[in-house]
Amino acid sequence: MKWANLAPRFREHAHKLRQALASAVELHLAGKWGRPEIETAGLRDYARVFGHAISPRTFWRSFDRTLTRVGQGGDFRHLEHYLPAAPARRAPAPALAAAIAALPNLAQAIGSVANITQPTPEETVIIWDAACVEWQRLGAHGLTARQAQKRVLHALAASGLDLARNERALRINFIRKRERWIEGGYTPAALRDQRPESSGHRRELPLTADDGKLLLARSLHGGLAQAWRQARNAGILSAAATQAYLHQPASKSYVPHRVRDHLTPNLRMLDDIHHGPRQAALQGAYISRDWSDVSPGDWYSADDTTLPLYYWEENEQGRPHVLRGQCLVMNDCRTGRLLAFALHSERNYTAKVIRGLILKVHDTYGLPRRGFFFERGTWASAKLLKGAGDEVPGTETELGLREWVEFRHAQPGNARAKTVERIIGLGYPRV
């Protein structure tokens, strides 16, 4: 739609929206600001320019639509990028209104449309039928087919109806409709949009429930393409599915699109179970922990991780030894603050490393008021922490830290139970 044909309120809205999104676009192009900063700037400027506030969801809808229209390396200065999804045309000028009025059948059809920007399918059929009738009437009054078509298209373009993306598309669409109208015996039924009925997606999927279960079961051991190929070649699918699809497709990875779309959601639901009980438990149902009755400094959490980077140290022979090492991290459960970390340049860590991390936190922040929240394994069995150890005199480890704090341990493999896992996860790249 041409800019001059837009209603004034939509042109004014585009001007204001460009001003409102200017700061957000600048932050986006800088490439060093995240969504929170862009959202804050956009909401602030939108309220200043338009005089009222909007929700973050409404802001991101307008902002993302603008980015999509501009594209990579586009120009954000063009006002067309800031128009709403379906802008309305301006009211026709007197000369254009007279052109519409000169075609009484078409004028009556246009006047019966409730929403000029979004006519219903039934209203669209009536409009095209009236346009074809007017084209035939003008031809009967001495105009050539080209002249009659030009007058009808001029009236349709001036009406404000959203029948095509531009004038060229409107002309092509009218020619197609007119040919179908003539072939169909000059009846409105020939002008109906037949795509919903002709689309293959409207046909019932020739796949039974047993076929779906069979393909899902076989997909867990090689993927959907292999399951489809093996089941199709073995002839174990239903007769309807066997007859509906090719027996020897060009590619061995071929799977009908509708079959893939139908089964993929169920396959994704089974991915965690396929990877094992631990993955299924981590991605399954859970209860969010309520920290409202916990104060900062009450509970500390710690865990270990193998760093996603390499470093080197000199060995006894003076040669560099490349390794990843073990990193132990401790944080406050209530605030999530990182308290300290300990790097151990070996493949496995011991109770001494854990105790060293606790001492480092103790020297800076003191012991937690209530206790530690650890995982199991070495964290649960370290006698150097809880007493009765053999590495130091028994008088120093008779009670260990249990005299002052409590030790709690998460269930094996349940990473969600430890708040420190959030900090560890921030150090790994998102691929």
Image (tube, grey):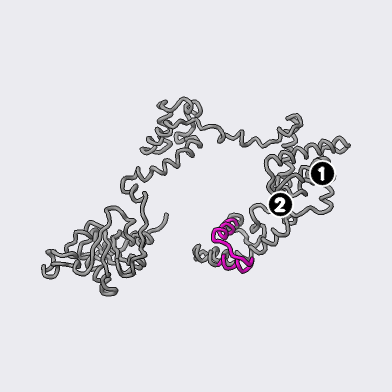
Relative horizontal placement of residue 368, taking residue 272 as reference (left or right) = left
Q: Amino acid at mark 1?
A: Arg
Expressed as whole percent of the image width and height from the top left, the position of residue 409 reads 25, 58
Q: Residues within 10 Å of mark 2 (few under 14, many from 20)?
A: some
What is the secondary structure assignment of the residue under circle 1?
helix
Relative horizontal placement of residue 133, taking residue 207 as reference (left or right) = right
Q: Which residues are magenta?
A: 41-65
Q: Residue furthest bottom?
A: 364
In the rendered structure, does residue 50 fall within the stretch colored magenta? yes
Callout 2–callout 1 Cβ contact below 8 Å: no
Which residue does the numbered mark 2 point to in the structure image? Answer: 1
Q: Residue at x 28, y 65 (%)?
A: 343
Q: Amino acid at mark 2?
A: Met
Q: Residue at x 13, y 65 (%)?
A: 391
What is the secondary structure assignment of the residue under circle 2?
loop
Quadrant showing the C terminus? bottom left
**How much space separates mark 2 and mark 1, taking CA atoms?**
19 Å
From the viewer's side, name the closer residue of 214 and 25.
Answer: 214
Which residue does the numbered mark 1 point to in the structure image? Answer: 151
The answer to whether residue 331 is seen in the rendering is: yes
Q: Residue at x 28, y 60 (%)?
A: 304
Expressed as whole percent of the image width and height from the top left, the position of residue 293 reads 34, 65
Expressed as whole percent of the image width and height from the top left, the position of residue 88 reads 70, 53
Asked where in the image residue 12 lies, by quadrant, the reply is bottom right
Q: Residue at x 27, y 73 (%)?
A: 366
From the viewer's side, name the closer residue of 349 and 182.
Answer: 182
